[in-house]
Image (spheres, rainbow, N blue to C red):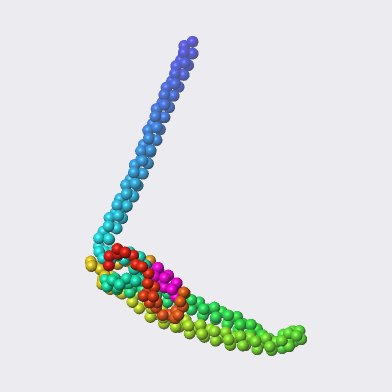
Amino acid sequence: MAAGNGGNGGGHGHGGGNGNGGGNSSSSHGKSASASGHASTKAGKKAAAEQEVAVASLSKEKNIHAKLGRLNSLQRNVNAYMNSKSKNFAAVQAFVMASANAQLAQAALEKANAAVTTAQTQLDALNSQLNALTSLTPDQIAALSPDEQAALPGKIADLQTQVADQQAAVTAAEEAAAEAQTAADEAAVGTDDASLDAALAEMANKPVDAEVTDWAKGVLGDKIDQVADKLEAAQAAAPSDPAAPTDPAALVEPTETGATE
């Protein structure tokens, strides 16, 4: 009987083991709560960092606009760039118009160079056909049918005529490309960084530093594209000399109101 009681006592000891298990469960919950708190803190730090970046960006934007002064009006619409009569704006306006025409001249040059490549490819193909016929050996000619032999001289003569005509087309395309290159080189005058710096300095009523110049480049790049689109449309509607710069006075449209010049 005593031994039996002792066995029961041992059972109680196992019960104590269950108690220890309860302690481990509590510890696990504590770790879980700690991890949750860490994640919450991390998210809070990320949100704070993003807010700090946003504030810094807003502060920088306010700072650049404070430095721009009269250059703030570079954001005016494209019609003002084409039609404005302001003396303060004249230098920047001239730079934008020149840059737009240079862009169109460069596009024309690329098109002319592509035409040369196409013409030369066609000439190469014709020469290849002609060489194939003129290089036939007597045995190869003898292997042709009587009709093919009879037609051979005419085919060769026809290809020779085509080759001559295509060679003339290549020469004409090369001359057009050379003219387009000259036009592009001339149109590019006054569109470099030095010209932009001079134009900004003439318009500005505050010092122009590197930050202001970078901002202006970003704004004017978009304006140049828009002006180029309008000039291209005008040339397509009334084609004349594609290499000649377009006169902005011929594209008069209402300008925006209230722009500071």
Residue sitting at x 39%, y 75% = 250
Vertical arrangement, residue 16 with respect to residue 194, above or below: above
- In the rendered image, is residue 199 in sight? no
Find residue 194 and report its image quarter. bottom left
Give the mark count: 0
**What secondary structure is the magenta-colored segment mainly?**
helix
Vertical arrangement, residue 260 with respect to residue 144, above or below: above
Q: Nearer the viewer, residue 21 or 244?
A: 244
Vertical arrangement, residue 200 with respect to residue 164, above or below: above
Q: Position of residue 220 (x, y in %)?
A: 35, 67
**Residue found at the very far right of the displayed protein:** 146
Vertical arrangement, residue 61 with respect to residue 94, above or below: above
Q: Position of residue 125 (x, y in %)?
A: 60, 80
Q: Which residues are magenta?
A: 223-235
Find residue 101 and report its image quarter. bottom left
Residue sitting at x 51%, y 80% = 116
Residue sitting at x 25%, y 64% = 69
Image side of residue 105 versus residue 165, left or right: left
Q: Position of residue 163 (x, y in %)?
A: 59, 86
